[in-house]
Image: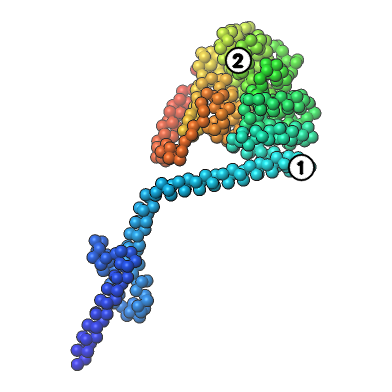
Amino acid sequence: MGRALWAELWARTDRARGVVKDGLWAWLRARGGGSQGSGRGEGPRALAMPRSRRAARRGPGSARASSPASEEEPNSEVLSRCSSASEGTSPTEEAAAGSEAASEQGQEEEETEDRLKEYMDNLLDKSAKTRQAALQSLRLAFSSKTLSEFLLERRLMLTDSLEKCLKKGKGEEQALAGTVLTLLCLQMGSGPEGEEVFCSLKPLLINILMDSTASSSARQSCATALGMCCYIAAAELEDLVSCLSCLEGIFSPPNTGEEGSAPTQHSPLHCSALQSWSLLLTICPPSHIKSILDNRWLKLPPLLSSSSVALRILAGETIALVFELAQDVEEDLCHQDTEFLCAQLKVLATESNKYRAKMDRRKQRSIFRDILRFIESGEYQEETIRFGLECMYLDSWARQRTYQAFKEVLGSGIRHHLQNNELLREIFGLGPPLVLDAATLKANKVSRFEKHLYNSAAFKARTKARSRVRDKRADVL
């Protein structure tokens, strides 16, 4: 009797399990389209009710929690169907996404313009700290973006504000105003607008530059601004000649002649003046270059004995630039001190004095080896500049001096301006800016593995090239 009762209870339990199992499969088919006879073969095993008493005590509400694998299987199928359906978006959806992106971009541009207007208004504030903060923000904005259309209508107001900062400001404010003026002229370009900005502030820049009582940082910034603005926007030869004379008076005092020696101490002002002067040499007409080659360039060799490594390197690069310009105008620079100049360059290319910093010695030797090689054999070490999908080659000292001048002013924004600024693309012969959509940019994007291979090959080639000329004093001497 007892055995029969237990057998009947066990049969009823099996039938209950079957009913629950069928109910669960029906519920899953209704949600995810799964079937009991699916090809995975994992459904029945995953949905089998546990035989332990502990599982039986959970009740019917615990069936869903006890079968996570069975639920993940149909849900993953549903997700895969949704993802495959989302890949094939219709043209209407793509157009809607494009219009949404355009609206977000327009909103971002409006916010940027509002901030720039606020910065321009703060230039007239009574607080010097507020004006300096506004100048700093404008410098960052002008160096990282192309804003020619926005600034075209506001150039006169901004020029007046910068003039007041240069006249009434002190030290850091004048230096920032000079930098912002340079960037404004770069944004305006070489047209009438840029020329108007340059001509209106040129006398003030010269006054601050020649004022010995002014701050050193302000004079340095004005020297850079005078050279850059003249390079970009000067339309008359008289403006070019006057700027050259003014800058030459800074790094080469009147009492320094062919037999004189440069003072041992130089400030960054002399470096800025020499850099701007050499930049303007690249756009001088041949007639004026001949007059410079006759006597003025002899003021450069004494600067090679300066205590400033930056000025020594700039002087050496300027001498190489003068020799390059002499080749272009078919002039010979042979004179009585040419041999002494080459000997001086050889000393600088192999200098190992311990009282100079190790990094300074290494940088000086590397650059002066290139300078000496160019003067003796006419060979120039070509350099490649990559930005975006384009590249630019620096194959002459004039081109290298121009790039270095713009890089010093723009900083990290040089690549953006090389891609989008029409003035820089015209100066370096890059043509009009490229218009690339997102699909083209994605197609030309280099993978991480390809970058690794390219960097490895470049590192190996660079090591081989440098090992041939690294501190080989015997070859130089």
Which quadrant is the N terminus positioned in?
bottom left
Left or right: residue 337 versus residue 201 is: left
Asked if 43 appears above or below 104 in the picture, the reply is below
What's the residue type where badge 1 is placed? Asp
- Camera-nearest residue between 248 and 237: 237
The label nearer to you, 2 versus 1, is 1
Asked if 258 appears above or below 37 in the picture, the reply is above
Figure quadrant of residue 203: top right
The residue at the far bottom in this view is: 1
Residue under numbered circle 2: 322
Numbered mark located on residue 125 in the image: 1
Looking at the rendered structure, the number of numbered marks drawn on it comes to 2
| Cα separation between marks 2 and 1 | 46 Å
Residue 85 image offset from top left, x and y in percent:
36, 53
The residue at the far front in this view is: 92
Asked if 81 appears above or below 189 in the picture, the reply is below
**N-terminal label among 2 and 1:** 1
Q: Which residue is drawn at the image coordinates 41% and 32% (left, top)?
A: 457
Q: Which residue is drawn at the image coordinates 70% and 11% (left, top)?
A: 259
Q: Can you see residue 422?
A: yes
Residue 217 image offset from top left, x and y in percent:
72, 32
Residue 231 image offset from top left, x and y in percent:
64, 23
Label 1: few (<14), some (14–19) or many (≥20) C-alpha neighbours in 10 Å: few
Asked if 280 appears above or below 159 in the picture, the reply is above
Figure quadrant of residue 25: bottom left
What's the residue type where badge 2 is placed? Val
Numbered mark located on residue 427 in the image: none
- Camera-nearest residue between 71 and 79: 79
Q: Which residue is drawn at the image coordinates 74% and 33% (left, top)?
A: 160
Residue 304 image offset from top left, x and y in percent:
64, 19
